[in-house]
Amino acid sequence: MKEQRIQQWIKNFNTEIVSVEAKFASFFKRQPLKDYYQIKVHDDIGYISIDIVNREALPTEIIDAITVALLRAKPRFKLLG
């Protein structure tokens, strides 16, 4: 279940990040957005996180947009009760 959740989250994030790249397209003409972050997978807890690489080169708005994309991409599962 954790592996499926992680894979879904990464898939969702990849979809969300496309809109971030489009929104800030002029910034990423020289270097693509994917060069500014790395996805870290935490298999033991079924979670992913993002490491921003070269943070000082990115405007705060872009860092915020990447973070929001990660949060929006998180799979939502209903609790059975």
Image: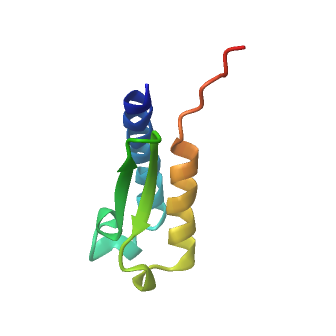
Which quarter of the image is occupied by the C terminus?
top right
Tell me the residue at 47%/41% (across/down): 45
Q: Say whether residue 25 is visible.
A: no
**Would you place residue 49 above or below residue 10 in this image?**
below
Residue 64, percent from left and from top: 57, 67
Does residue 59 appear in the picture of this structure?
Answer: yes
Residue drawn 41% across the image and 66% down it: 51
Question: Where residue 67 sits: x, y (%)?
Answer: 54, 60
Vertical side of 56 occupied by 71: above or below = above
Q: Quadrant of residue 76?
A: top right
Residue 68 picture location, percent across and down: 58, 56
Identify the residue at horizontal 44%, vertical 49% (top origin): 48
Identify the coloring: rainbow
Considering only vertical position in the picture, is 8 above or below 51?
Answer: above
Q: Residue at x 54, y 62 (%)?
A: 65
Residue 20 as seen in the image, left or right of residue 53: right
Point out the image quarter for the N terminus.
top left
Nearer the observer, 67 or 15: 67
Frontmost residue, 32 versus 37: 37
Q: Is residue 81 left or right of residue 76?
A: right
From this viewpoint, which residue is outermost toward the bottom? 56
Q: Nearer the viewer, residue 20 or 52?
A: 52
Q: Residue furthest front?
A: 44
Q: Up-down: is 58 above or below 81?
A: below
Extreme top residue here?
81
